[in-house]
Every structure is written in structure tokens, then in C-alpha cells.
Amino acid sequence: MKFFTYILFFIFIYGCAAQEVNTIKYKFRTEDIVKKECKIAVEQKKRSRRNDVTSKNFITHYTKAFNANNKVKRACDPYR
């Protein structure tokens, strides 16, 4: 039981530790590339939304929408 407690404790400490964050815009990608990828991701999201209107399963529909939103956020993020 002690071992399990130590593992949980170290996972908690590691999760709360400060993570390195990029603070420089367009460090890894140029502004043009970010705009192109953002536009492509938004268009893909529009197309996938039209195709998934007939989805009967709520959880499947929700996860697809969640993943599409994350894809757009990542594509439009200049710090990535």
C-alpha cells in the first residue's frame, strides 16, 4: 500500500511541475504556413460536420467534434 501511495504522490508532483512553454511566435513555422494550415483545418471541419449530421451515436459525434476543434486550435496556434 505504501508503494502505491508513493507512486500516486510522484505522479501528482510531476503533474504539477512547471512545463516548458514556447513564448516566441512563429518560432517553428512561418506566418504564411500557419495561415494556410489554419484555413485547411477550418475547411476540413466544415466538410466533416456536413458528413456527420446523420450520426446516431452521441458519444461518437461528440468525440469527432472535439477532435475537430482541437485540430483547428493546433493548426491556428502560432506558438506550436
Image (tube, rainbow, N blue to C red):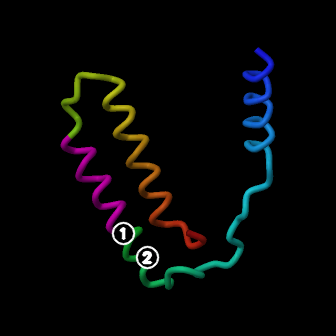
Q: Residues within 10 Å of mark 1 (few under 14, many from 20)?
A: some
Which residue does the image show at 79% across and 43% down from the upper left? 16
Q: CA distance from mark 1 to mark 2?
A: 6 Å
Q: What secondary structure do most residues of the magenta stretch adopt?
A: helix
Which residue does the image show at 41% across and 68% down from the upper left? 38
Secondary structure found at label 1 = helix
Count of picture labels: 2
Specify whether 74 is left or right of 1.
left
The percent position of residue 19, horizontal first and vertical second, equals 73, 57
Residue under pointer 1:
39
Residue under pointer 2:
35
Secondary structure found at label 2 = helix
Foreground residue among 66 and 54: 66
The magenta stretch spans which residues?
A: 39-51
Magenta run includes residue 60: no
Which residue does the image show at 80% across and 31% down from the upper left? 9
The percent position of residue 28, horizontal first and vertical second, equals 54, 80
The percent position of residue 20, horizontal first and vertical second, equals 72, 63
**Picture quarter containing residue 42?**
bottom left
Which residue does the image show at 23% across and 52% down from the upper left? 47
Quadrant of image for the N terminus: top right
